[in-house]
Amino acid sequence: MLSIRNLSKSYVLGKPVLRNITVDIAPRGVTAIIGPSGTGKSTLIRCINRLVEPTEGEIVFEGRDIAHLHGQDLRDVRRKLGMVFQEYNLVERLTVMENLLTGRLGYTSAWNSFRRKFEQADIDHAFELLDHVGLAAFANTRADALSGGQRQRVGIARALMQKPALLLADEPTSSLDPKTSVEIMQLMCGLAEENEIPVMINMHDVELAKRFASRILGMSGGTIVYDGPPDLLADDKLKMIYGGEDWLA
Amino acid sequence: MSAFALSAFGERRPFRASWQVRLAWLALFVYLVYAASTLELSWPRFVQGLGNGAHFIGRMLPPNFERWELLLQGLAESLEMAVIASFLGVVLSLPLSVLAARNLMPAIVTWPVRFLIMLCRSFHPVIVAIIFVKAVGFGALAGIGALTIASVGFLGKLFTEAIEEISLKQIEAVRATGASFMNTIVFGVVPQVMFRFIGFSAYETDANLRNSTMVGIVGAGGIGGTLFAAFQRFDYDFVFAILIAIIVLIMIGEVLQIQVKRVFKQ
């Protein structure tokens, strides 16, 4: 499905944030990436849909290296990669429905998007998704009028509007309260499971990661130091990922 | 005891008037006196001016609306010039501001465009109007050209700054869906700047309305030409009528501007 080979990224020459990451992502299931702040979790996720340019290595997606694509080829790949952001990144002044339809922009000409003219099938799909995320009554509400939890629901629906082959989520619950966090994770992982979409999530909440992921990647210092199921993630492994031990007590 | 210890070194003051500031004030005062003396500003001159002014005002009253047709024609021409120039200014500024925004375009594109916008803003509309009158001849065309240039200089800069202040997170999310550059503009940039653009455009239309009454003085069409002619013929009562008409026009423009902003609020 997705195969990352020797991926490295340095924002500043000689100071790599990612060092030689090699990992395969299966076509099903939730993979959670955990690790301390600044260890490159976000950079790894963003290299995949190329919001960040990788310095070296390959990202093989659907049998093709996408690490160096440009222009239309890159946009075609991005259409298949849904992304959910920590701060939702909705277009605040657009309505919920417009934000959902943003997920179809990769298939819409500029002239049609200017006239807000989308395929009827996409519009039906959008209403269906709104129903699924429990925001059916908010289609014409502006995004900036929503609460954090509601915004992230819109963010998830927007990503799913792309009918993605892979769902990327960058700290999707870090701006939410614990209860809403669980609800958002349930919703996102549930919808992904239903639609058979694999998910890659960055998290810093280890318990939440263990609860929802079938596979955990532990990162430290720009490399993957743990790769396995959540129940094998014992204290000694956590010590290896985060360092220190006082916090585990 | 320790609380008083410092008084040994003099009083403590909460604010310090530095000698540089005092020197600056003194320099300003000296320059004012010097400037007034070279311009022969004196009390007798002022009194003489007052008498002259009283005579002038006496001749302005009452305003003379006998030639109202000429007045209305001039006003209509000014209004038309202002609206056309504002429209052209907005239409030209939209693409220019996208090209000039440093968060959307590489430096190689933004520099020339920013220079062009700066060039449009360098001269007062009246100077541009003189150039246009010399280039294309007397009349409204010259005025429209001059006001359009002024609008591009003003709106281009404000639009560019509005675009440079948008949230890039929202843009990132739109790009991540595979949207093209134009789609990103339509769905990511425009919603963020729309309201401000409308506000700026309404303001610029208002400014153009005012400037359109002035470019006529140099022969670029509009009520200004009528006003200038009336001055030269010492028809001060007609001048007063024109001034009242301009005030009414500007007030109507002001009301319209507030309405436009209210409609598009949010």
Image (cartoon, helix red, strand yellow):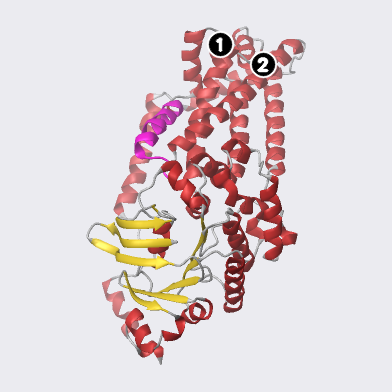
Could you classify mark 2 by the number of other residues whose Cα lies within 10 Å: few (under 14), some (14-19), or many (20 or more)?
some
Q: Earlier in the sequence, mark 2 or mark 1?
A: 2
The residue shown at (71%, 13%) is B73
- Secondary structure under badge 2? helix
Name the residue tied to disc 1: B219
- Secondary structure under badge 1? loop
Residue B94's label in the rendered image is none
Relative image position of residue A181 (x, y in whole percent): 57, 74
Work out whether residue B59 can be spotted. no
The residue shown at (71%, 34%) is B256
- On whether residue A203 falls in the magenta region, the answer is no
Q: Chain of mark 2?
A: B
Relative image position of residue B56 (x, y in whole percent): 63, 17
**Drawn side of residue A149 relative to residue A18, left or right:** right
Instruction: Have a look at marks 2 and 1 and say if they share a chain.
Output: yes
- On whether residue B116 falls in the magenta region, the answer is yes
- Please, is residue B133 above or below residue B84 in the view? above
**Drawn side of residue B2 relative to residue A107, left or right:** left
Viewer-proximal residue among B77 and A8: A8
Q: Quadrant of the C terminus of chain A?
A: bottom left
Badge 2 amino acid: Glu
Residue B77's label in the rendered image is 2
Q: Which residues are magenta?
A: B102-121
Q: Chain of mark 1?
A: B
Viewer-proximal residue among B4 and A173: A173
Discs 2/1, front: 2
Relative image position of residue B242 (x, y in whole percent): 68, 18
Badge 1 amino acid: Gly
Tell me how far mark 2 sits from mark 1, CA to CA. Answer: 13 Å
Relative image position of residue B100 (x, y in whole percent): 43, 36
